[in-house]
Image (cartoon, rainbow, N blue to C red):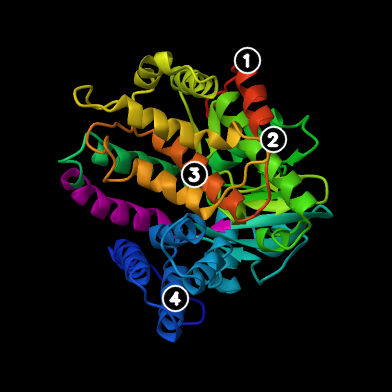
Amino acid sequence: MADDPPSWSLPRKGRGWASAKAALKLGRVAARGMTGRSTEELARALGDQLDGMKGLAMKVGQILSYMDTPLPDDLRAQLARLQTGMSHRPWPEVAVQLEAELGMPAAEAFDAVDPEPVAAASIGQVHRGRYRDQAVAIKVRHPGVEETFRSDTDALRRVAGLASVASTVDGTGIIDEMAARLAEECDYAREARAQRLFAKAFADDPEIHIPAVVPERSTGAVLTSAWCDGDDFETLKQASPERRRAAAHIMARMAYRSLFVHAAVQADPHPGNYLFQPERVVFIDFGCVRFFERSLVEAHRALATCVLENRRDDFPAALDATGGIGRHRGFDFDHEWRVQRHTWAPFMQPDFRFTKAFLTEGNDLYGPMAPNSRTRALPPPAMWIMRLVWGLYAVLQRLEVPLDLGPIARACLEEDLDPLPPIGE
């Protein structure tokens, strides 16, 4: 009936996990040499499937689009569109949801709203609007996406225990950690609080901008922020080397100052979360934010300092303090020293260039065939540090400019630790 509320179209249970496996399988097939027209067609079909599903499947596609995975260029190009999305819910459905959330029709809540979204991502879609003569971005959560995440992470949890049998890595703990963060990403009220905390922490930095939240038009499923114009990442890639280099330094400074000074990270460094203005970078999407205990950050600061200062004798104790050793017997500290020196190489060499070869070597050093694959540990919170570091490296590699990151690391490690307050305060 015309007056009935719209029916939300939700993925069936398990489809997200199936699509994630399909994406990884396609990457393996591509690595064995599948090229040409057939790969292009498969790439387009997979991109369409992931884009339409939202939830965990789309998030996997987003990560694959910028991480160093064995994917052909045509598949990576299709997955790159997931950074902003293509499929979206029609405006009448969104309007009904806005009225339910805000307690008034969208036409009353806002001066104007563009019915066509500017982005559609794994959890919500964004519309441009106006509120009190100010341009705003209105992010509206997809209904039911929380349940989609829960069902897909339940599927992952069932196999995580088996995957951990031959390793000291707590697979189930990592899935639990991921599930907790995904649940937080679905809570736009929490995201609004995190966004305000980061905006306050970087308020005096002229090169870093975080949009202001409009609290009176935000709820648990709607987040309204000040609108910011700027170039997207694909446009930045075509800019001058000087501009690309400046933007890369800002992105790195934001990441490492967040971690080493404020004990919190915006743990989703995919290119769709940046806007590039002439003199600054705008950071958007604070749904995936991980706040760390002071002790964990202190341990990682000490480990980074140990590696950067080439203090090999102090390395075993520094690594142990981070919880990175799952089993001491048989642990190869020489190999792990090589791992850490490789990880921190961009901060030890002036004019360092990120390359695919550098990222591939990093994968091999951490991979299942590495000497410590069965003795290394990964405390669940630390997975977000790894995602931040290697995700950022993958993004910087695509800018193809030499970078001088050493001063950024030294400045962050020399500054006193000043953790952001807990999210509820």
Q: State which tag comes first along the sequence, 3 or 2.
A: 2
Marks 1/3: CA distance? 25 Å
- The vertical placement of 237 against 313, above or below, is below
Q: Magenta segment, which residues?
A: 140-162
- The vertical placement of 103 against 334, above or below, is below
Residue 222: in sight, yes or no?
A: no
> Which one is in front in this view, the residue at disc 3 or the one at disc 2?
3
Q: State which tag comes first along the sequence, 2 or 4.
A: 4
> Which one is in front in this view, the residue at disc 2 or the one at disc 4?
4
Contact? badges 1 and 2 (CB < 8 Å): no
Q: Position of residue 4 (x, y in %)?
A: 47, 75
Residue at the image position 67 percent from the left and 42 percent from the top: 403
Q: Secondary structure at mark 4?
A: helix
The answer to if 141 sits in the magenta stretch is yes
Query: What amino acid is found at the position of numbered circle 3 in the picture?
Result: Trp
The residue under label 2 is 199
Contact? badges 2 and 4 (CB < 8 Å): no
- The vertical placement of 107 against 349, above or below, is below
Question: Which quarter of the image is occupied by the C terminus?
Answer: top right
Contact? badges 1 and 3 (CB < 8 Å): no
Contact? badges 3 and 2 (CB < 8 Å): no
- The vertical placement of 347 against 47, above or below, is above
Q: State which tag comes first along the sequence, 1 or 3.
A: 3
Q: What crowding class fits label 4: few (fewer than 14 Cα within 10 Å), some (14-19), or many (20 or more)?
A: many
Q: Position of residue 273 (x, y in %)?
A: 61, 52
Marks 3/2: CA distance? 24 Å
The residue under label 4 is 43
The residue under label 1 is 416
Q: What crowding class fits label 2: few (fewer than 14 Cα within 10 Å), some (14-19), or many (20 or more)?
A: some
Query: What amino acid is found at the position of numbered circle 4 in the picture?
Result: Ala
Query: What amino acid is found at the position of numbered circle 1 in the picture?
Result: Asp
The residue under label 3 is 390
